[in-house]
């Protein structure tokens, strides 16, 4: 892996890895909260930082077959979600290049209380 | 070989002009008796640059010149004359003048020089008119220099009235530079000669100032009439500089011999992989040679540092105590202590002889990313991801602290009082080291992963996440050169200057190679293949005469410069340093990944 060049986010609403507190996403990049991952609620982001992507994988989801890559926290290597490489259904194409983060493994470091 | 007839004629003319002197000196010349009979054979030992003359016959001044030179004989002889004069070979100097017929300077110039050095200003003034300065402006400028010297000397002797007269009547006429005149008139107020010298930046009539005036006057006098000072020395210096420039692998000091061209035996660096050090249990992230070259220190993700002996490549001490990964090291200038920076938000100071922890430094709120010593053995500076730059005393107290951008890497030049800080984005910030005030910014097109400053603080290199290395000239603040070929992404790879006078540039690469370029030509000199995974750091020590690289494969490679078996330059393939443990970790990675894949199919529900 190597020594990570850690990016830092600014402003309000910063989501970080629950284990190592590395900044991952910003509230302003949220596209939809209406997703479900393997740990429950999940959020679709347009852009995130400090993650590493795994192998490509073809998965059938409730909205159809997608090619995705799981993503991991760059610092502690914990699984945090996945990213869409390709969607086969035309109406799902908008998700390509975007990221799902599991709500369970990230938290908003700018708040001292949490709503799921 | 004789000179063309034209030159011969010229020589004869010259000797005719002073044939008396020449003929009296002939019988004393040892060369005339020994060499005359057997032609040029014995004289081959004599200097080849100096055309020889064998004044055996009374009238026929025929010379045997051993080679034809593309340079004008008069110029060569006059340079020799100057060099002889500078070195104080007075007899040879006069003899060569007699023998060659050339004089170092003609009579008016010699007179001119003598009167300046003696401070006979009236004579100087007269001479300036006769020595052939072409334009009126040049003559005025030259006269100004002379009068200025005269003015200062009068002031020094406290002859204020005369000085004032010169300023009013002569200096003010000779120049339009009002500022300069104001500065000169302000010197009238100086209470003592010492204050005058300090204010004028002038070392007095008895010092070197008259020589300096002479040197400045040279600009207005044709070099053919007055040979520029130390001309031969200048040419030698230029020749050696040129030879060094042409030497790609310049890692040893330039031999000052004038007999042979300077070359570094190619390739003197690198000579191949000498040893591969194992001892860390995880990725090695940083390396630093001690200033005396006896030790190498390595910092690792396994939260320890190791001090290696460069003599037998053994582990001297293992420094453990950090609660986070160690990502930076800095040796004190006396090589007795070392500071480590860690993601546990602390710095630690270790005794190198005993391996003991001397002090822990608690003051950062985030990962401490970098640290450097400040010239002495008592203070160092650190930067962190928490927007802080702190100057520490080794006793643990904070000397100074400023808020800054998040510090990703920093570099220091104590001599130039310069601190460079790479932030976590794309900028380099320059600070004055003594006051920690902001000076200027350098902007890069992509995130800066690492930063290195040359020893003379003239150049800095930045490694970008796009896999480019940029070199900046800090005097002009312009980007001078780009180096590429290595791969680099979001993980930090530390670049470095290497070689003597920082003439090489090295960096690691994610493909496990290390790259070496020539700094001035940008030519890729070597790709070093010693690691199986990302090479995180390259560091050079002239004292140790080696380059060290460290990698994610947990090993450190030493690439010596001067010794070891020669090898091909395309990179030395060594047996895979992947040990049992690293294979195990590979399996771990895989099992983790497969676990993540196999657990459950990630469910994606869109409403």
Image (cartoon, rainbow, N blue to C red):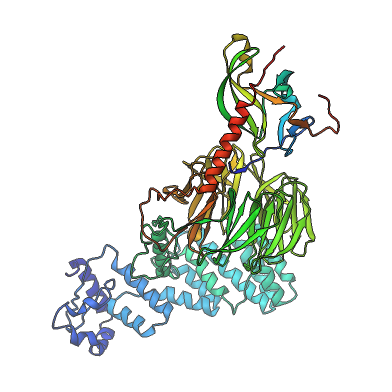
- Quadrant where the image shows the N terminus of chain B: bottom left
Which residue is more in the foreground, B201 or B404?
Answer: B404
Residue B136, visible in the rendered structure: no
- Quadrant where the image shows the C terminus of chain B: top right
Q: Is residue B579 left or right of residue B569?
A: right
Count the marks. Answer: 0
Which residue is more in the foreground, B465 or B179?
Answer: B465
Q: Position of residue B383 (x, y in %)?
A: 71, 51
Picture layout, residue B487 above or below residue A28? below
Picture quadrant of residue B360: bottom right
Q: Is residue B390 left or right of residue B473?
A: right
Residue B564, visible in the rendered structure: yes
What residue appears at the point 50 percent right and 60 percent down from the top-left corner?
A: B501
In this view, the residue farthest toward the right is A113
Q: Is residue B574 left or right of residue B360?
A: left
Q: Is residue B390 left or right of residue A66?
A: right
Q: Position of residue B299 (x, y in %)?
A: 62, 54
Q: Position of residue B500 (x, y in %)?
A: 48, 61
Picture quadrant of residue B274: bottom left
In this view, the residue farthest toward the left is B37
Picture quadrant of residue B279: bottom right
Picture layout, residue A21 above or below residue B219? above
Q: Position of residue B210 (x, y in %)?
A: 55, 74
Picture layout, residue B226 above or below residue B425? below
Which residue is more in the foreground, B468 or A69?
Answer: A69
């Amino acid at each position: 892996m190597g020594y990570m060049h850690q990016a830092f986010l600014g402003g309000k609403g910063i989501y970080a890895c629950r284990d190592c507190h590395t900044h991952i996403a910003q509230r302003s990049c949220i596209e939809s909260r209406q997703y479900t991952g393997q740990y429950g609620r999940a959020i679709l982001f347009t852009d995130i930082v400090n993650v590493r992507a795994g192998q490509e994988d073809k998965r059938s989801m409730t909205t159809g077959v997608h090619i995705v890559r799981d993503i991991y926290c760059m610092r502690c290597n914990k699984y945090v979600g996945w990213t869409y490489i390709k969607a086969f259904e035309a109406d799902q194409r908008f998700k390509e290049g975007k990221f799902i983060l599991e709500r369970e493994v990230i938290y908003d470091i700018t708040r001292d209380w949490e709503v799921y | 070989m004789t000179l063309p007839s034209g030159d011969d004629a010229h020589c004869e003319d010259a000797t005719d002009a002073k044939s008396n002197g020449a003929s009296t000196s002939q019988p004393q010349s040892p060369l005339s008796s020994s060499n005359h009979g057997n032609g040029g054979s014995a004289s081959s030992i004599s200097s080849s640059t100096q055309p020889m003359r064998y004044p055996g016959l009374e009238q026929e001044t025929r010379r045997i010149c051993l080679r034809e030179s593309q340079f004008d004989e008069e110029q060569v002889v006059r340079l020799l004359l100057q060099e002889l004069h500078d070195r104080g070979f007075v007899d040879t100097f006069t003899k060569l003048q007699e023998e060659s017929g050339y004089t170092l300077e003609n009579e008016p110039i010699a007179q001119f020089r003598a009167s300046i050095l003696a401070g006979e200003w009236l004579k100087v003034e007269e001479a300036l008119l006769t020595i052939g300065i072409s334009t009126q402006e040049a003559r005025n400028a030259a006269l100004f220099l002379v009068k200025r010297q005269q003015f200062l000397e009068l002031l020094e002797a406290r002859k204020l009235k005369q000085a004032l007269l010169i300023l009013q009547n002569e200096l003010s006429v000779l120049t339009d530079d009002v500022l300069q005149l104001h500065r000169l008139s302000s010197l009238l107020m100086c209470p003592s000669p010492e204050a005058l010298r300090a204010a004028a930046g002038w070392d007095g009539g008895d010092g070197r100032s008259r020589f300096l005036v002479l040197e400045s006057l040279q600009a207005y006098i044709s070099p053919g009439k007055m040979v520029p000072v130390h001309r031969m020395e200048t040419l030698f210096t230029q020749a050696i500089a040129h030879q060094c420039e042409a030497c790609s692998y310049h890692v040893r000091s330039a031999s000052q011999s004038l007999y042979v061209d300077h070359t570094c035996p190619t390739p003197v660096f690198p000579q191949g992989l000498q040893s591969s050090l194992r001892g860390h249990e995880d990725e090695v992230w940083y390396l630093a040679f001690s200033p005396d070259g006896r030790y190498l220190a390595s910092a690792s993700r396994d939260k320890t540092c190791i001090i290696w002996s460069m003599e037998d490549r053994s582990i001297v001490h293992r420094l453990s105590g950090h609660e986070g990964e160690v990502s930076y090291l800095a040796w004190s200038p006396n090589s007795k202590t070392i500071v480590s920076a860690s993601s546990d938000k602390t710095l630690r100071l270790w005794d190198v002889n005993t391996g003991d922890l001397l002090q822990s430094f608690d003051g950062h709120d985030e990962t401490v990313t970098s640290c450097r010593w400040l010239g002495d053995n008592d203070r160092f500076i650190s930067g962190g991801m928490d927007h802080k730059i702190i100057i520490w005393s080794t006793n643990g107290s904070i000397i100074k602290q400023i808020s800054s951008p998040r510090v990703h890497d920093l570099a220091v030049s104590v001599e130039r009082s310069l601190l460079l800080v790479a932030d976590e984005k794309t900028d380099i910030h320059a600070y004055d080291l003594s006051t920690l005030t902001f000076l200027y910014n350098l902007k890069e097109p992509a995130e800066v992963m690492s930063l290195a400053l040359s020893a003379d603080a003239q150049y800095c290199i930045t490694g970008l996440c796009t896999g480019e290395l940029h070199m900046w000239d800090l005097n002009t603040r312009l980007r001078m050169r780009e180096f590429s070929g290595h791969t680099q992404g979001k993980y930090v790879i530390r670049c470095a200057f290497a070689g003597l006078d920082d003439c090489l540039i090295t960096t690691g690469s994610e493909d496990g190679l290390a790259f070496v370029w020539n700094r001035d030509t940008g030519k890729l000199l070597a790709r070093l293949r010693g690691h199986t995974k990302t090479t995180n750091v390259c560091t050079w020590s002239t004292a140790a005469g080696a380059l060290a690289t460290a990698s994610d494969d947990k090993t450190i490679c030493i690439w010596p410069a001067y010794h070891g078996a020669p090898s091909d330059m395309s990179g030395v393939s060594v047996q895979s340093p992947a040990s049992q443990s690293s294979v195990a970790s590979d399996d771990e990675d895989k099992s983790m990944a497969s676990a993540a894949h196999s657990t459950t199919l990630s469910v994606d529900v869109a409403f």
